[in-house]
Image (tube, helix red, strand yellow):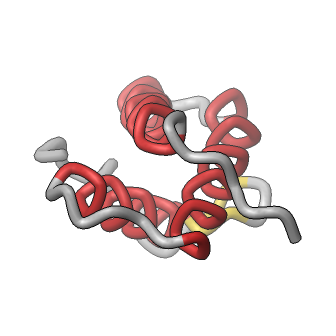
């Protein structure tokens, strides 16, 4: 949670996924879960969606630190999402 955001990646996207937005969304949802506040159905769906986005983009990132940063973010998203099943649509 304390790792610096990859230099030069603010305002960029990979495969149409905004890196700052995915980072902020996952960090906020994971923080909510860690604080014991619980994530509502919309938050659970968002967390699963962001984990899927990260599955898509991590293999496409060619800079080592950036790829590792978003791989860790993906791991955090998956760990926080794992106990929750997204609500049926």
Above/below status of 73 relative to 47:
above
Can you give x and y, in whole percent of width and height, for residue 14 in the image? 68, 55
Q: Quadrant of residue 54?
A: top right
Above/below status of 61 relative to 41:
above
Can you give x and y, in whole percent of width and height, for residue 6 in the image? 33, 48
Can you give x and y, in whole percent of width and height, for residue 20 in the image? 44, 68
Above/below status of 4 relative to 82:
below
Q: Is residue 54 left or right of residue 79?
A: right
Q: Nearer the viewer, residue 66 or 75?
A: 75
Q: Quadrant of residue 25?
A: bottom left
- The quadrant the C terminus occupies is bottom right
Q: Is residue 86 left or right of residue 12?
A: right
Q: Is residue 36 left or right of residue 57?
A: left
Q: Quadrant of residue 79?
A: top left
Residue lying at 49% horizontally and 75% vertically, measured from the top left: 11
Q: Nearer the viewer, residue 7 or 52?
A: 52
Can you give x and y, in whole percent of width and height, for residue 34 in the image? 21, 50
Residue lying at 61% horizontally and 55% vertically, measured from the top left: 50
Total numbered labels placed on residues in the image: 0
Residue lying at 41% horizontally and 65% vertically, measured from the top left: 39
Residue lying at 23% horizontally and 66% vertically, measured from the top left: 37
């Amino acid at each position: 949670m304390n790792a610096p955001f990859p230099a030069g990646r603010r305002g960029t996207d990979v495969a149409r996924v905004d890196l700052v937005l995915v980072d902020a969304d996952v960090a906020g949802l994971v923080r909510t879960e860690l604080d014991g506040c619980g994530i509502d159905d919309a938050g659970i769906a968002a967390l699963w969606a962001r984990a899927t986005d990260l599955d898509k983009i991590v293999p496409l990132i060619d800079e080592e630190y950036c790829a590792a940063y978003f791989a860790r973010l993906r791991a955090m998203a998956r760990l926080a999402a794992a106990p929750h099943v997204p609500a049926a649509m």
